[in-house]
Amino acid sequence: MNSFTFTQGERDQSGELVTLDSVPPKTERSVISEYLSIANRRRWLIIGSIVAFLVIGLIVTLFMTPLYTATATLEIQRENGNFAEVRGAERSGNAVDSEFYQTQYGLLESRALAERVARSLRVADNPAFFETFGVTPPETWFDKNRPVQTAAIRDARVKAAGGLLLDKIKVEPERMSRLVKVSFTSPDPQLSKRVVDAWSENFVQTTLERRYSATSYARKFLEDRLQQLRVRIDQSERALVGYASAQNIVNIPAPTAAAGTTESGGERSLVADDLTNLNRELSQATADRVQAESQLRAGGGGKDTLDTAASSTLRARRAELASDYARMLKQFDPQYPPAQALAAQIASIDTALRGEGGRVSNNLDRAYKASLGREEALAARVKALTGRVLDFRRRSIQYNILQREADTNRQLYDALLQRYKEIGVAGGVGVNNISVVDGAEVPSRPSSPRLLLNMAIALLAGVLAGVGLALLREQIDEGITDPIDIERMLRLPLIGVTPKLTDGNPLTVLSDPKAALTEAYASITASLGFATSHGVPKTLAITSARPAEGKSSTSYALARALARTNRRVLLVDADMRSPSVNYLLDMPLGEGLSNYLAGADDLAPLIRSTDSEHLSILTAGPQPPSTPELLSGDRFEQLVARLGREYDHVIFDLPPVMGLADAPLIASRIEATLVVIAAHRTHKNVARLAIARLQSAHVRPLGVVLSMFDTKQASYGYGYGYGYGYGYGYGNQQDVET
């Protein structure tokens, strides 16, 4: 049984129901629950969308043209290899240079390379190549499948073919490596392989050609510059020699460090060389003169002055004699003859030594004068050469200018010549930094279409489309799809829910006491027993917001359910505009309510019996000219009071609320009113407007019965398969709407 809450109505002293207000608690639902509810209600729409997209994906995959992809792997090294040990035209950079590699990737995808490949493979001359990619070439390009060889048309064909190749080529660098994959996709596996091989080969060739072109330009520039420098060297050397001859400037090669002298570089003049030599001799003469002068000033008595061969011999002899004389004096007297002889010899030697000293002094004087004379002569000669050198220097200023110009031209020429040789060697070595690691192979199976991938994409697209359509339908569909929406949107209690019948007549189903529909109305009847202090209202009006919402079936089912409790029940068809109770019970319309309201005094002939002992029917009767006029009189109130005295319960089947004044007029005079709303059909705003219209007529609806509810579209089950089927044996289970 479905649970619901409502506030029981209050009664006045006469026992009449004067107010019945219900303010159900507000039920909050999580966002996830809300979306799951939508998905459950719209599951067939989502499933249908998924199936449709899967079928479309399968059909598209089957009709797609198989494509084959050939792939080659290239290695691109930084341009830092120099096998000739000379510098090339470009400077070496860092081994990890993103700018360099991005440039290489751009060159791999350049239009110039694509057109070069098109020329090498001659695909531009084959009309089948264009047809392979779905391109129809202009008629001017080919004449009976033979290419037109005019320059303009040939260039146009090559450009178009290069564009097709460039659209299908794919360059994929491998992360953290120098490898790059080059792939080409086409319907022909052989063509894919040929294009990838040609692409790799032409990329290598263009790299070499660019490098050779760079060195070729450098060589041409250096050749022109060297030619200019040779002319300038010839002119500068001629000017140098002519000036030297005119000024009588004679230079000799400067001594080098290998010869034991200080390196001065270049050339030096003959006058300067003579001055250098004389100055060196003058320095030596001055030193000799100073030495002789010092010896002369020593007076010839110094040890160095007397240190000659003769004087050395005499001094040695005197020392021996002096030694002998000293030993002899230790034993004998100085007057001893041998002692006197020794003393005489010593005196003789002293006399000889004094004579030798005079001779040395004369020699020192002569040596001093000779050194002085030589020094003076050299000084005069140096002074004369100094004047000549100064004059030579004045005359060599222009010579040195010409000499520097000639040397500069020669050095520049030598440097450019060396650079020219290096570039020539570097350009001739042909070092290539591009190499093919793995060549392309003929693909054995197509790379596309990929059935599993396409089906996965179709499945994802189907799910997204289905969910989108479900959300769109949910926004468009304002019908009440969940019983919980009754209390939340209409602010009325939910009295009960009746299931939707997929087949069968309602009367036939209601005749089965164990049917889900019968149990649903039994549950509604039990709920009505708690509506007032005396149980089920004595007079009860059943209406709906719009036609065909199940109010007549609900009226009959409630009347039948009350009659089964041995109560006297009368079902009044108050819808005089469109009677339906007589059609529901398969009986003629005949006379009925409209006749009594029009003035008939005898009510008994108008009431008909049914197959149920305690249930009677009062049909609507013939349609009156103005139904509101009949209902506005006192006859209807008298009828309600009379029937209330004669029957335990009187149930009125009212017309729909929207568009008619009948339902508010009748419901305002009835003890209680139930509003039947068809699930999944009645617009929420229509239901709100109907309730508001009843309330504006001072009618307090007792609650709402949600009819024709399809539990398969609900976010949770309502128990029709378990609750109302409880007690069935396994062998006696019946298929009922849940």
Image (cartoon, helix red, strand yellow):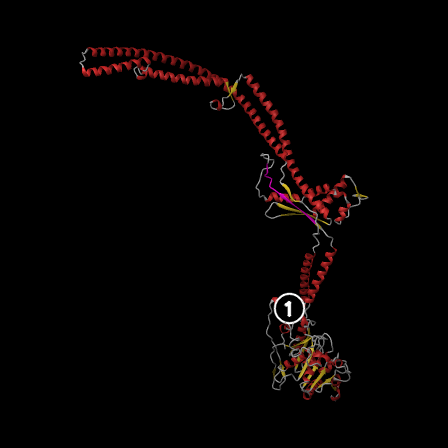
Residue 278 in the image, given as x and y percentages of width and height? 44, 17
Frontmost residue, 526 versus 656 = 526
Query: Split into 4 quadrants, where in the image is the C terminus?
Result: bottom right
User: Element at badge 1?
Assistant: helix
Q: Residue furthest right?
A: 144
Q: Nearer the viewer, residue 94 or 441?
A: 441
Q: Position of residue 323 (x, y in %)?
A: 24, 16
Front residue of this view, candidates 391 and 195: 195
Q: Tell me where residue 351 appears, x and y as whole percent.
A: 26, 10
Q: Is residue 7 left or right of residue 50?
A: left
Q: Position of residue 288 (x, y in %)?
A: 38, 16
Which residue is found at the position 72% from the left and 58% from the top? Answer: 58
Position of residue 682 relative to residue 373, above or below, is below
Q: Which residues are magenta?
A: 69-82
Instruction: Mark yes or no: residue 653 visible.
Output: no
In the displayed structure, does residue 247 sit left or right of residue 557? Answer: left
The front one of 612 and 634 is: 612
Q: Is residue 213 above or below residue 441?
A: above
Residue at 19%, 10% (x, y): give it. 337
Residue 77 is a magenta residue = yes
- Total of numbered circles in the picture? 1
Q: Is residue 629 visible?
A: yes
Question: Where, by quadrant of the figure, is residue 670 drawn?
Answer: bottom right
Residue 301 counted in the magenta span: no
Q: Is residue 471 above or below residue 535?
A: above
Dot 1 amino acid type: Ser
* Mark 1, other Cα within 10 Å: few <14 / some 14–19 / many ≥20: some
Pointer 1: what residue? 37
Q: Quadrant of the N terminus?
A: bottom right
